[in-house]
Image (cartoon, helix red, strand yellow):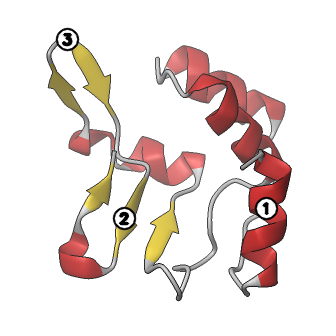
């Protein structure tokens, strides 16, 4: 699903979304913090920068860039690749990485 389609689908189901991330925040996300988000994730955050609250139908919360920075302690390295938490599930407080 394209990022704009995802945005429209989330709004249609009543998910409250945050406004888009600034270009400066997106640069910091990619450059300063060294988070390799890929083009798709960068496009999503340029349209909306996470959820204001949990998506009640899927019980997922996609964090804002600011929250990802706050939760850097959750980063993990596995087989030489760095994984950063960028959201969570309501179910047993699992993190999306």
N-terminal of the pair, mark 2 or mark 1, is 1
- How many neighbours does mark 3 have within 10 angstroms: few (below 14), some (14-19), or many (20 or more)? few
Q: Secondary structure at mark 1?
A: helix
Relative horizontal placement of residue 40, taking residue 87 as reference (left or right): right
Mark 3–mark 2 distance (CA, rounded to whole Å): 23 Å
In the picture, measured across the screen, residue 1 lies left or right of residue 19, that is left
The answer to whether residue 64 is seen in the rendering is yes
**In the foreground, 62 or 5:** 5
Residue beneath disc 2: 88
The vertical placement of 76 against 31, above or below, is below
Give the residue at x 54% y 28%: 37
Does dot 3 land on a helix, a strand or a loop? Answer: loop
**Crowd tier of the residue under label 1, counting other residues whose Cα lies within 10 Å: few below 14, some 14–19, many 20 or above:** some
Location of mark 3 (residue) = 80
Residue position for label 1:
7
- The residue sitting at 71% across, 79% down in the picture is 16
Cα gap from disc 2 to disc 1, whole angstroms: 18 Å
Q: Quadrant of the C terminus?
A: top left
Which disc, if any, is residue 92? none
Residue 87 in the image, given as x and y percentages of width and height: 42, 58
Task: Identify whether 81 is placed above or below 51.
Answer: above
Looking at the image, is mark 3 or mark 2 earlier in the sequence? 3
Query: Which residue of the protein is positioned furthest toward the front in this rendering?
Result: 1
């Amino acid at each position: 699903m394209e990022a704009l389609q995802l945005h429209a689908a989330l709004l249609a189901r009543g998910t409250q979304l945050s406004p888009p991330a600034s270009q400066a925040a997106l640069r910091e996300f990619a450059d300063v913090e060294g988070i390799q988000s890929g083009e798709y994730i960068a496009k999503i955050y340029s349209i909306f920068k996470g959820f204001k609250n949990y998506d009640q139908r899927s019980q997922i919360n996609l964090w804002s860039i600011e929250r990802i920075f706050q939760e850097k302690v959750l980063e993990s390295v596995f087989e030489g690749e760095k994984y950063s938490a960028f959201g969570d599930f309501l179910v047993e407080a699992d993190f999306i990485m």
